[in-house]
Image: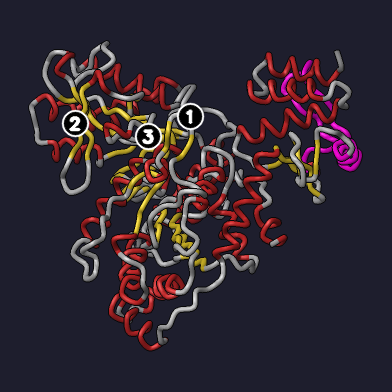
Amino acid sequence: MSKAYASLKRAYGNGFISDIAWHFANYAQRLDSQASESVIVAAALVSESAVSGEIRLELAHWGGGCVFEDHHATAYMLPEMEAWYQELKTSPLVSDGECPAPLVLTEDRCLYLYRYYELERRLAALITLRSGPIMVEIGSDEIEQTLDVLFGDDLVSGDQRDAARNAVDHRFTVISGGPGTGKTSTVMRTLRMIWRLTDVSPARTLVCAPTGKAAARLREVMGLELKAADGATDFLGDAVTIHRLLGWRPGGKFKYGLNRPLNCDLLILDEASMVDIALMVSLLEALPKKARLILLGDRDQLSSVEAGAVLGDLCRAADEGYSIGSVTSLRHNWRFGGHSEIANLAAAVREGQTQTAVEFLNESRSDSVGFMDPGGEKKIEHLVRDHIVPVYKELSQRVISGALYSDIFSMLDQVMVICARRNGARGVIDINRQVSAQLRTLSLASDSEFYLGLPLMVTKNEPTLGLFNGDVGVVTGGANVTDLKVVFPRANQEHVSVSINRLPECHPAYALTVHKAQGSQAKRVILVLPETDSKVLSRELVYTGLTRARESVEIWSGLDVFSAAVSRSAARPTGLMERFRCH
């Protein structure tokens, strides 16, 4: 057994690499029993990177370093970058991407799994095909007059006007901005403008989002403001998840794709930062060649759970001057004024200004931003008791008393508890357990899996029931378990009711992970960070959590952990910009 293989085996046994990385390394070893140690280790590292969301492995970052050093018995020293590059280059397991091979090595010393190299290449090609302007026979005077009608002459709406103006003559449009910058308002006005001035039909305009919750929020806003708009009477306004739009089938196959495009002139995708590279490719391949695409999102939020950082890459490519259609960043914040403590703290976190953010927390005397150091398990239990339990106590009491669904759903909007991770102390499971335990002492929860007032999040799509990953509902019904049902809010004061025995996979939702909270907002947010620093913490995670709040936010963390998070970036190494250069 080689030293590298023994090191990998011990690393796998100690949980330092995933099942996927371990089995892929074994697969590579079987394909080429003569492969050098560094090639097999590279196979494990690049597949492990993909598991954590990274498209490629940059040899310059790893070469000459020690991996799996968490335990001395697993440590392995990699060759220097250039020597490693040459070993990979001559391996039959590696190609330059022109022919299929498990691994792809690029001239800029980056290693890919073939799947992700090909996805990146296809995405760049699909975007490039749509990047040029559309020849429209519309006079500039008519465009400006329409903009005046839709936006008025307010100078602070200049970025929004630019986005709408550019969308008229581009097939590919990106509108990026933080919460409160008016992305949804901008796209609704842009829709009216496109419908008035082009041959795009409202009836052939589709809207989607990555999660059921994000789609429901978009559906509600657009339904209220566009249904009554002039020229929008044929607009369906039914925002759905991407999977539902593409016709997801068991086995991961989509109904719509290259050979069966969607029936639309225009597609709007909200919360684009949450979309991974594979799903974005599937969406673009399903779009008719002449159809327009508008992406909305916040480039500074956490990237997708799966591999890729598509929205951020597109915005950075535009910053570098690449021609990829129209990319507009909205800067003016309509929700938070210039003196908003939430906005100012979020800005410091976004820019990685650790000292500024810490000083802000230390000096804050506002009700809109709070900082609490739990300092131990006993204290975290007190914080849960005093700050979270009262909200869910009232929710349970409303359900038990038979309150209107609208009154029940309004409680879900009062507070959102967000954790950095799912497992471990101060994780989602831990906080959910603590809330449930304290409600039991008040006779408002039971040891049963389901009970009145329990909030639940769906974690698996079930289109036949109209339920999708990310939907949050509340258990209601009678005193008997057989009478229980879960009610999910929908747009325009409507709801979906599902009996307990028909529920898809779901989990308690007193607390959510930051990823699950994306696309959602609440009046008050409690952001819970772990007791000690963790590689999952980053400024993007903290920024995303903070910006879920509309009125106030509380951060439960030690200052050292908060500082470490703000100091760390979760930016992922990708090669999308290099692919644009090739096109």
Q: Amino acid at mark 2?
A: Ser
Q: Earlier in the sequence, mark 3 or mark 1?
A: 1
Instruction: Give residue 209's position: percent from left, percent from top.
Output: 39, 48
Is there a contact, CB below 8 Å, between mark 3 and mark 1? no
Q: Secondary structure at mark 1?
A: loop
Residue that numbered label 3 is attached to: 469
Residue that numbered label 2 is attached to: 497
**Above or below for 450 versus 172:** above
| Residue at x 48% of width, y 29% of height | 251
- Quarter of the image containing the N terminus? top right
Instruction: Give residue 137's position: percent from left, percent from top.
Output: 43, 83
Q: Secondary structure at mark 3?
A: loop
Task: Kindly report the distance in space between the C-alpha atoms of the residues bearing marks 3 and 2.
Answer: 16 Å
**Above or below for 167 versus 86:** below
Is there a contact, CB below 8 Å, between mark 3 and mark 2? no
Instruction: Give residue 232's position: percent from left, percent from top.
Output: 24, 65
